[in-house]
Amino acid sequence: MTFDVVTIFPEFFRGPFEFGVVGQAVKAGVLSIQVHDLRTWTFDKHRTVDDRPFGGGEGMLMKPEPVFLAVEAILPERGPRTKVVIAAASGRPFTQQVAREWSTQVDRLVLVCGRYEGIDARVSEHLVDDEVSIGDFVLSGGELAAAVIVDSVARLLPGVVGNADSTINESYSVLTVEDKVWKKGRDARGKRFKGSRELQLLDCPQYTRPADFRGWKVPEVLLGGNHEEIRKWRLETAVRKTAQSRPDLLPADLLQELERLKEKSHDERDAAEGLRCEQEDDSGDPDRRHGSRPGEDQGR
């Protein structure tokens, strides 16, 4: 796969693409990354790429002509396995699912990095195939977003990551979960679910040596060697982690069931604490058991 990045700051990418698995994959010829200076496609003395917006307003906009010329030079012919993308705060969310789709459906990905107040709208209307946003925040330019997109897509390509399974069993992977995970699950019509459903989960907590660090111990289940119990524990903790950090990823009925189980656990813990206190009272000072105060004369 080939990535083309169009930017006014080509030097920015000397670092991000030279390290880690992406840098190793480039050196091994598994993928190619080409960085293009947008100013190459300007023709005035100042190599101008921006101008004031029509209608007034703050800041400057990137001109359409250099962007059109750049993309047309990079991709003189476009096909179903080529894609031109702008990373913009106004784009649709760039997710793990999108990264997986591009890693299997695209052979050449062109990323146009915006600057200033954005790019002339005719670029998105008549040139690019997609606009994506890496989060609900605004950056000073598209370079950081482009680096994120390249890394997330590249690591999913065959031969980039040493163990391909590590890109399957991770956050935002879609897992098929048996219905027994939420025994009381119901659909919108109130009917119980049967069989299994697909869930997009965050990764479960991970631990490494030492097993006991400053008194914080690794969960016993991970040390026992029972792979089925470990699988169940990882699934359960992944579901709970997702419910805590990203509840929007889970179906409403599962969230309700988790909340019910949480309340039940609290009630059981409170009951156990109350029983323990009663047992301590019963096994304590005999004078206290009979309701007398310390030092009180029992003979009177």
Image (cartoon, rainbow, N blue to C red):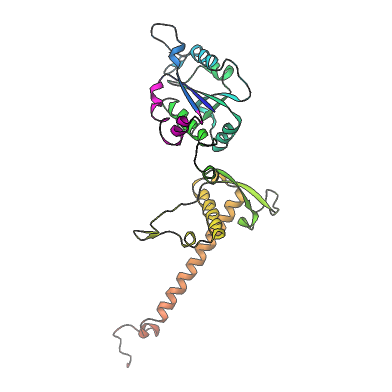
Asked whether residue 51 appears in the rendered view, the answer is: no
Q: Residue furthest bottom?
A: 299
80 versus 177 height, above or below: above
Which quarter of the figure has residue 137?
Answer: top left
The picture places residue 83, in percent across and down from the top left corner, at 57, 24
The picture places residue 210, in percent across and down from the top left corner, at 38, 57
Judged left or right of residue 97, residue 296 is: left
The quadrant of the image that shows the C terminus is bottom left
Return the residue nearer the eye: 194 or 164.
164
Q: Reply yes or no: does residue 25 show up in magenta.
A: yes
- For image coordinates 40% across by 77% down, the residue present is 280
Asked whether residue 74 appears in the rendered view, the answer is: yes
The quadrant of the image that shows the N terminus is top right
Which quarter of the figure has residue 50?
Answer: top left
- For image coordinates 38% across by 9% down, the residue present is 46
Principal SS element in the magenta part? helix
Q: Reply yes or no: does residue 222 show up in magenta.
A: no
The picture places residue 166, in percent across and down from the top left corner, at 51, 44
Judged left or right of residue 156, residue 215 is: left
The picture places residue 151, in percent across and down from the top left corner, at 48, 33
State which region is magenta: 9-31
Which quarter of the figure has residue 21?
Answer: top left
Q: Residue furthest front?
A: 28
195 versus 72 height, above or below: below
- For image coordinates 58% across by 47% down, the residue present is 250
